[in-house]
Image (tube, helix red, strand yellow):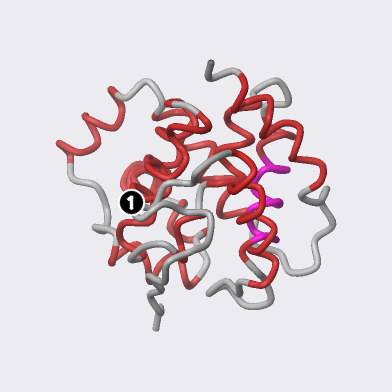
Amino acid sequence: MIEENTKPIAGVAAENRFLNIDDLIDYLSKLAFSPMTEPGLVELDHALQCAAELKAIRPDDLELQVAGLVHDIAHSLSHIREHDKVGADAVRHILGDRVADLVALHVAAKRYLVATDDEYRSRLSPISVQTLDLQGGTMSADEIVLFEADPNGRDACLLRIADEAAKEPDRAVPGLDAWIEPLRRVAASRG
């Protein structure tokens, strides 16, 4: 069974928004102590693996990579069914609209891929299959049309594919230190 966690987090405002980039980085570092529902992983392992996957796929797309790093950041801030939206809201004012929109769409992308790719469901981890039902199940035809019209839909699918690939215990990828400068660059590009 998936457990929910809605404890307040230091450095996070009451409305579940990070106060600044330093608080976001500090929170990411604490994910090294936050077990995932996937066996043998902590949340930081998953985040780093996802970002590394996206860097390999799109080496010049820093926003997509950073979205991969923070896509599940709200697992401890919200209900599992809402972690995509809560995570997007938590980072939007720091990392910008595109990163936040990709975070917001990563659950919809799973639902879309299950609906449109006959083999995708078989690539989901057992936990992802379980959460799929909690997150609305397979998309309807109307939902597919709306998702395909979203300008970030394709990249959200890349994020979702990287998300599923980023669940390997003991996989060696660059650590959080390698992502501090990219995080700061994305935050600085906001204005």
Q: What residue sits 61% from the left and 64% below the top?
A: 43
Residue 155: image x %, image y %?
Answer: 49, 30
Dot 1, how many residues are within 10 Å of its Cα: few (below 14), some (14-19), or many (20+)?
Answer: few
In-image side of 177 versus 72 (left or right): right
Of 91 and 42, which appears nearest the observer? Answer: 91
Residue 56 in the figure: left or right of residue 16: right
Task: Identify the residue at image location x=47%, y=71%.
Answer: 127
Q: Quadrant of residue 181?
A: top right
Main secondary structure along the magenta-highlighted residues: helix
Instruction: State whether residue 145 appears in this view.
Output: yes
Callout 1: helix, strand or loop?
Answer: loop
* Quadrant position of residue 113: top left
Q: Relative to the observer, which residue lies in front, 122 or 12?
A: 12
Q: Residue extending furthest bottom?
A: 1
**Camera-side residue of 32 and 187:** 187
Magenta residue span:
44-53
At x 64% / y 35%, what residue is drawn? 65
Q: Position of residue 11 (x, y in %)?
A: 53, 54
Q: Is 76 colored magenta in this rendering?
A: no
| Screen quadrant of the N terminus | bottom left
The residue type indicated by label 1 comes to Glu
Q: Position of residue 7 (x, y in %)?
A: 41, 71
Q: In front here: 9 or 56?
A: 9
Q: Which residue is mark 1?
A: 15
